[in-house]
Image: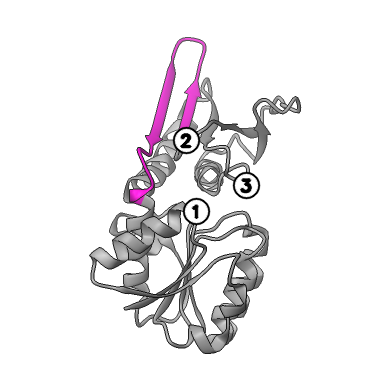
Amino acid sequence: MKIALLGYGKMGHAIEAFATKRGHEVSLIIDENNLDLLTADNLKHVDVAIDFSTPSSVLNNIEACFDAGTPIVVGTTGWYGQLQKIKDRCESGNKTLLYGSNFSIGVNLFFHVNRVLAKIMNAYPQYDVQVEEIHHTQKLDAPSGTAITIAEGILGGLDRKEEWVNTVAGTGDEIVAKPDELLIESLRIEDVPGTHTVIYSSEVDEIELKHTAHNRAGFALGAVVAAEWLAGRKGFYSVEDIFEFNK
């Protein structure tokens, strides 16, 4: 496949390495230095685009790919408030988009186990639950998209929690969650690729479900696999559609 990379930071470089290793060609790279090259004409010459840009540029990148008829894999987070609008535009225009808060195989296994555990914990109201996420200080959005997906998995299975709330440690604006709120605590620490923990706590013990990324390789490989899976498809997909254990 010929691939366009939209965003060329650390993730973009890692994706390029995996794509090349798997026999693909990265024929177009767009970052903040050459935005003038993000044209329908250029995008029409690639088979798929992979976006790991920024929350402020991702919507424009999606629209550019839609205009060109180029399938796009979106790993950028921080734009999900517009998700329904983009889905409607994708489906009505017969376009192709696959999005995900995290493309790592390990994280998607974590998502699945998290949903199963939340349903089990309905029978044990003595346990309160919260989510903790730790990322590098360059991460622009909080909570992380992965943490939001985890929280939504809990809310979908645990009846005693109605909505999630977020607090960023060290800002001075920390909050205390109400009993029906699911707290997501965000921490920003240098050189942490991503650590997510679900903590069920009672007066007598604590249960933790944890995923620790050692580097960006899992995310990058997963994005390339998602691009391969998307080939020849039309429609609006999430990364969950790729994995058999979700079916």
Q: Is residue 46 above or below residue 157?
A: below
Residue at 36 percent of width and 65 percent of height: 226
- Circle 3 sits in a helix, a strand or a loop, which is it? loop
Query: Magenta part of the protein: which range?
Result: 196-218
Q: Are marks 2 and 3 in contact (CB under 8 Å)?
A: no
The quarter of the picture where the C terminus appears is: bottom left
Near mark 2 (Cα within 10 A), the count class, few <14, some 14-19 or many ≥20, is: few
Query: x, y percentage for residue 59?
Result: 63, 68
- Circle 1 sits in a helix, a strand or a loop, which is it? loop
Q: Is residue 245 above or below residue 61?
A: above
Residue of label 2: 191
Residue of label 3: 140
Q: Is residue 118 left or right of residue 24?
A: right
Residue type pointed to by label 2: Asp
Residue type pointed to by label 3: Leu
Query: x, y percentage for residue 68?
Result: 54, 86
Give 116 or 134, whichever is nearer the viewer: 134
Q: How is the image coloured?
A: one colour
> Image quadrant of residue 22?
bottom left
| For marks 1 and 2 on the same chain, the one whose residue lies earlier in the sequence | 1
Residue of label 1: 101
What is the CA distance from the residue labelled 2 to the residue labelled 3? 14 Å
